[in-house]
Structure formats: C-alpha cells, structure tokens
Image (spheres, coloured by chain):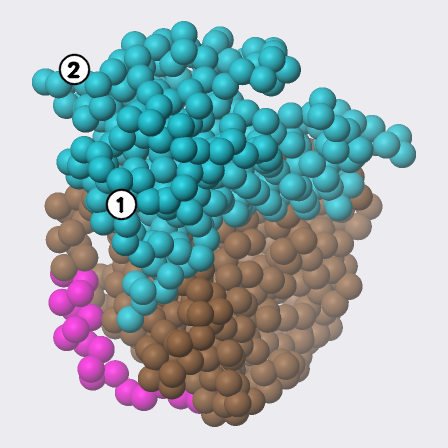
C-alpha cells in the first residue's frame, strides 16, 4: 500500500496548475468576471489539446488512457483556479459526444429539478437518468439548442455560472454507454473541485493572516484567527484523503462520503476565509466570495448532502 | 495513489488472522474497570502471548528487540487485532508506545538492554509523569525539581493524570534540572522506579466513576543519574520524540472500533424502529463518511511515514490533524448512540453509555484540541507564534 501521489501524478498536477495559472491567472479571472464572459472557447480547445477532456478515453480512441485518480487531480486544480464552464459534463461526455474530447464542443448537464449551468453556451446536453435522488439509472444526450428554446434564464448567485431553468421532462435523446456511472463520476469530480477550492481558501486565509497587522501584530498570531485557519486545514486534508481514496476505489459509498466532506470543506473554509479577511472579505474585490458562491452551487450539484447521507446510511449494517 | 496491499502484506495479514483465531477463544474474561491488579495481569499476559508469537514491538527497530516491521505492517497489525476483538494494549501502553520507543531512540546501550526487553515481554509496566497540576497542556511550565546530589538526582514535586500509576514499575518522568534556564531548556527525562521511597500515588476518580488515572507526589525521591535518558537539560527534545509516537498511530485500532460501533448502532436503530427517522439515519450516514475518511487519513499518514523511511512513528503534525478530527467525531458518535438508545441512554449498564462519558476525554488528553490547533497553525501553516 502506498497511498501517496506517484511521480507521474505529481508531474501531471504541476503541469495543469502551470497551464491554468498561465491561461487563467488572477488578472484573467478578474477580467473575465468584469466582462461577464462565460465559457472561453479558445481556452476550452486548448484544454482539449492538452488532453483535459480525453484523459480517460483509451489511447486507441485518441485519448490519454489515464484513470479516475488523474481526473481528480485535474479537477482539483480547476477548483483552485475558479475556472468556469461545464467542465465535468464535457469531460464525462468525451467519446460519445462528437467534439467533446477535443474541446470543440461544450456539454452542459441536466439533472432533474436542478437548474442547468451554461445552457446558453452549450452545444449538447447530458441528461442524467431518472431514478431516486441518490443514484441515476442512466443518461442520454440531447441537442442543447432545442432545450434552450423552452428554458428560462435564472439570475445566478455565482457570477461565473449562468443558470437556466428547464421545464421537465425533456423527452428523447441518445442513450449513453456506462450512463449509470455518470452521477457517481460527476459527484467525484465535483468533490475534487471542492477540495481544490477548500485548499485554496486555506492558503488565502493563511497568507492574509500572516500579512495583515492589527494591534501591532499580524492577526495570524492571535489564537482566535490561528484556530480558524487550523480548522480549515483539517477539513481540507480529511476531504483530500476521502476524495483520493474514492478515486482509487470508485466505490459509490466512498464517493458519496467524499462529496459530503468536500462540500463541507469548500463551503465552511470559504466562510472562514471570508471571516479572516474581515471587512475586505465582504467586498467584491476580494476573491473569497467567488469561491464561496461556487462552493454553494456545487454542493447542490451531482449529489447533494441529503442524498449522499442516505447512500452512506444504506451502507451501514 | 495505491490502496492495494502487497503480496507480502497480505501474507502477513493472513498469518496474523490465523494466529488470532487460534489464541483468542482461550483468553480468560476481562477484569472489571477498577480492578487494577487484575487489569495489569490480564494486559501483561496478553503482551507475553504477543512476545512468544513474535508480535511484540512489531514496529520497534530490530536492534531494540522489535521486528522492524514497516508502518503498513504495523497498521495491519492494529487493524486486525481490533477487528478480531483482541485485548487493547492497556497497561502496556506507555511502555510500548512512549517510553520504549524513546529509550530505543535516545537511550544508551545499557539503558536499552535494561529496560526494553521487560517491556516487550510484559514483565514491567511504565507510566507517564509529564503533566503537573499547574502545567497541563503547558508542559514546559513543569516545576518538579531534580537537584544533583553526587550520582543521584533528588526529585520533589507532583504529577497528575498519570494512567496506570497504581500498578506501574517505572515512570518516564520529566523534571526541571536547571531552574535558571529558559523553560524548554532546563528539563531532563528520567526513568524513576515507582517503589522508590518518597513516591506516593493517589487515585483520581473520573466523571465516569472509575479510577483511570492518579495523582503522584514526589518527596525527595532519589533517582540515579544513570537513569537519565538523553543529555541533562535536553529532556524537551527527547520528549518531542515521545510525543510524536503518542500522536501518530495511537488511534488506529480505535478508528476500526468506531466503525464497528457505527454498524452496531445502525443495527440497533433498525431493530428498535428508530431507523425510520430520516434525521437520525442521515446523522449516522454522515458519521460513516467521517470514519471512512479518518481511516483513509490514517492510511495516508502511514504511507507518508513509510516513504520517509519511518519505523512506525508518524510525524507529530500529521497526528495533530488526525487527532483534532477524530476526537470530535468520536464524541459525535456517542451523542448519536444516545439518540439511538433513547430513554435507555440514562442507564449506565447499557452498552455505549460509559463510552459516551469517556469520549469527553478525547479533546483533552494527549494535548487539548486548542493546543493541537496551535501546533497545526504554527508548524504546518507557518503562522507566527503569539498569544
């Protein structure tokens, strides 16, 4: 047993972090925020060329041939960087949906009862199958444009994630192979994004606490602030172990646990980061509200707390 | 990221499982919680069985009499013994997990030869004389003084929260040997015989009604200078070696036990009909996520130690992250147990009720949660020291 990252995995993570820092660093991120732009098609194609969407496709089908643990490392970096767009749905649709693997197509996701993110910019729509709230029984693909015609825009809490309300049910569509795995894999990748966000807000809080002085000392020297930061690290590290283990086992119960703990870590760490930033944290200028809003949104997507807890309860003897 | 055990590790697990299945049915009944001589006899007999079977000091280095097992093998050992319901390390705890590893790492050849074999065989029991009435978590504020008199130290002061003091043969004792030095610099680590003249032990009754630990009064106790481990006034560094063991793999068996308890709670809730309450059911589901993740965190820490070439001790800071979450989760578990029990949660004879009481100690013992948060903030996150 060696439950640590391999050298290749470390290199992959470092490469993605570098790519995203170069193409979606803080200045670009804030510029995109001010411009109100959603999916950056050029960046989308660049990610496609780097193998971001085709990561788990077999090499014979033009993919990279890697597994869930590697995908989790990619999406952890996405979570750190606040990169917007329906990246998970497009990643899951790579292969069955033409152009998704190369980053030529943007694929959004419809989960019954949930608003659809980025529907206005999507080419195709991944529809999670019916079934109970916890587990999907399959998935299909639809033409996004036709669904959009019958959808209403929602004023989204996350300025980076436009939302559309779609009248259920959406009929027809092409069934997807391995469709029953979609919700589990989507939940795992969303958990990875939450983990990245939780780790990033911990760093932001620690950095601010070390620099900001009050009463003649850095605020990070005060126990009240120090203990908030320690709690953030503990949440992020427990979520990290849960998410990585779920990526290795791909076990639905373990994925539910990972999503639950990562949602918790992302939301609560962003809140604590905001608190450490004080008044600055409540302004539009600080990035922390962007992490919090995205974390709130992701908590309700793929597998929300109530459904995850039922999966975990069902596993007990 | 690999959670698969190697062929060698699987063989080790299989042999251990076989041995446990053969010996456990023949064990006598466990003595009551306040029967200290009985508990000592029971725990040391188990230690002797481990020794005879070659499982004593599994994670200790070979030159200290151990098996030099990898951290993963040690993890398997703790997991399997707990799963099989084998006796807890009990009265041997301090000797095997604190004093022994410290002597193995810092002691002279004579000290290792004198003290290590009896710990492994279960012949001698150690207790820990670190905490003092006025210096609990602020360990460096300890005041027990040792004054040099020829080839002896003369020790006076008092210690508190000393587990197993009533039945211990030896005490790992922290004393102040240079009162003028800065707080961390004037401390030494001594091995003190518990039957030396001047040692008085007074049991303390816990809120659970039992006598888990004791106060210890030291009145001009003479300890040979040759019983000092490490250099004079270097005891703080030696102690940090000890604490890294305490905060490392100390809770592995307990995580396994908590997962078993959680399953038992679910079974009891199903039996009583409380399972139909979605609030309780979801609460148990969330605890399932907690203890699964804590088990993965343990595997993560152990893998990290193994890569670092560690011999079973896990770096103290990783242990702090674990302990902060675990101690809280354990308390949550027994709060949920009380809800499952309903009206029976007031009955001290019901299973889990005493555990609910004793779970209160987990956020205090071995460094309070507040101290652990300081350690995480300062040593891992690099935040400035302060108040």
In this orientation, does residue A112 appear? Answer: yes
User: Mark 2 sits on what residue?
Assistant: A62
Q: Is residue B144 left or right of residue B205?
A: right
The chain under label 2 reads A
Q: Quadrant of residue B276?
A: bottom left
Query: In the image, which lettered chain appears brown?
Result: B
Q: Locate the C terminus of chain B by quadrant.
A: top right
| Whole-percent x, y for residue A104 in the image | 30, 13
Chain identifier, colour cyan? A
Element on which disc 1 rests: loop
Quick check: B197 above or below B173? below
Q: Residue at x 67, y 53 (%)?
A: B370
Q: Nearer the viewer, residue B157 or B257?
A: B257
The residue beneath circle 1 is: A129
Q: Quadrant of residue B124?
A: bottom left
Q: Which residues are magenta?
A: B15-38
Q: Position of residue B73 (x, y in %)?
A: 26, 51
Chain name for mark 1 = A
Return the mark for residue B65: none
Q: Within 10 angstroms of label 1, few (less than 14), some, or many (20 or more) residues?
A: many
């Amino acid at each position: 047993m060696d439950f640590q990252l391999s050298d290749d995995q470390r290199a992959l993570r470092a490469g993605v972090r570098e790519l995203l820092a170069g193409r979606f660093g803080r200045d670009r991120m804030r510029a995109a925020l001010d411009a109100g732009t959603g999916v950056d098609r050029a960046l989308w194609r660049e990610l496609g060329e780097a193998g971001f969407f085709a990561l788990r496709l077999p090499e014979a089908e033009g993919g990279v041939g890697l597994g869930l643990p590697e995908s989790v490392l990619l999406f952890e970096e996405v979570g750190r960087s606040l990169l917007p767009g329906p990246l998970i749905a497009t990643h899951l649709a790579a292969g069955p949906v033409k152009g998704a693997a190369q980053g030529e197509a943007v694929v959004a996701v419809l989960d019954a009862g949930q608003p659809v993110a980025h529907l206005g910019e999507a080419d195709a729509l991944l529809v999670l199958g019916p079934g109970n709230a916890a587990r999907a029984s399959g998935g299909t693909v639809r033409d996004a444009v036709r669904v959009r015609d019958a959808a209403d825009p929602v004023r989204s809490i996350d300025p980076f994630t436009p939302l559309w309300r779609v009248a259920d049910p959406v009929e027809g569509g092409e069934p997807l192979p391995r469709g029953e795995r979609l919700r589990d894999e989507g939940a795992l990748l969303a958990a990875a994004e939450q983990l990245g966000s939780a780790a990033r807000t911990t760093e932001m809080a620690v950095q601010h606490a070390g620099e900001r002085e009050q009463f003649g000392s850095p605020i990070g020297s005060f126990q009240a602030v120090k203990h908030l930061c320690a709690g953030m690290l503990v949440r992020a590290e427990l979520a990290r172990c849960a998410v990585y283990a779920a990526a290795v086992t791909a076990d639905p119960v373990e994925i539910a646990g990972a999503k639950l703990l990562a949602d918790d870590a992302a939301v609560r760490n962003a809140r604590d980061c905001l608190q450490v930033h004080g008044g600055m944290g409540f302004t539009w200028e600080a990035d922390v509200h962007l992490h919090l809003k995205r974390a709130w949104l992701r908590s309700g997507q793929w597998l929300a707390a109530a459904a995850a807890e039922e999966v975990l309860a069902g596993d007990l003897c | 990221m690999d959670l698969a055990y190697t062929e060698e590790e699987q063989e080790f697990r299989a042999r251990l499982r076989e041995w446990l299945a053969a010996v456990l049915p023949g064990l006598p009944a466990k003595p009551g919680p306040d029967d200290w001589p009985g508990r000592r006899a029971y725990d040391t007999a188990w230690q002797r069985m481990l020794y005879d079977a070659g499982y004593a000091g599994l994670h200790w280095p070979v030159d200290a009499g151990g098996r030099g097992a990898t951290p993963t093998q040690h993890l398997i050992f703790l997991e399997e013994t707990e799963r099989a319901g084998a006796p807890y390390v009990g009265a041997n705890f301090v000797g095997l997990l604190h004093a022994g590893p410290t002597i193995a790492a810092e002691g002279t050849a004579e000290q290792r030869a004198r003290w290590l074999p009896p710990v492994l065989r279960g012949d001698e029991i150690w207790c820990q004389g670190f905490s003092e009435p006025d210096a609990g978590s602020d360990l460096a504020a300890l005041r027990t003084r040792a004054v040099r008199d020829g080839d002896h130290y003369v020790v006076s002061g008092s210690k508190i929260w000393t587990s197993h003091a009533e039945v211990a043969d030896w005490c790992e004792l922290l004393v102040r040997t240079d009162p003028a030095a800065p707080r961390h610099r004037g401390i030494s680590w001594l091995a003190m015989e518990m039957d030396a003249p001047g040692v008085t032990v007074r049991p303390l009754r816990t809120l659970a009604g039992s006598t888990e630990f004791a106060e210890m009064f030291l009145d001009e106790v003479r300890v040979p200078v040759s019983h000092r481990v490490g250099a004079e006034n270097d005891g703080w560094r030696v102690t940090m070696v000890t604490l890294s063991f305490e905060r490392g793999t100390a809770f592995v068996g307990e995580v396994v036990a908590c997962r078993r308890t959680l399953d038992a709670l679910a079974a009891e809730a199903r039996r009583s009909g409380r399972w139909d309450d979605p609030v309780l059911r979801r609460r148990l589901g969330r605890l399932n996520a907690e203890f699964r993740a804590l088990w993965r965190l343990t595997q993560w820490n152990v893998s990290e130690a193994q890569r670092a070439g560690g011999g079973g001790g896990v770096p103290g800071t990783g242990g702090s992250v674990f302990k902060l979450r675990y101690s809280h989760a354990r308390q949550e578990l027994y709060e949920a147990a009380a809800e499952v029990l309903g009206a029976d949660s007031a009955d001290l004879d019901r299973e889990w009720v005493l555990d609910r009481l004793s779970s209160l100690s987990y956020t205090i013992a071995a460094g309070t949660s507040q101290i652990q948060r300081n350690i995480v903030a300062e040593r891992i996150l690099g935040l400035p020291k302060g108040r």
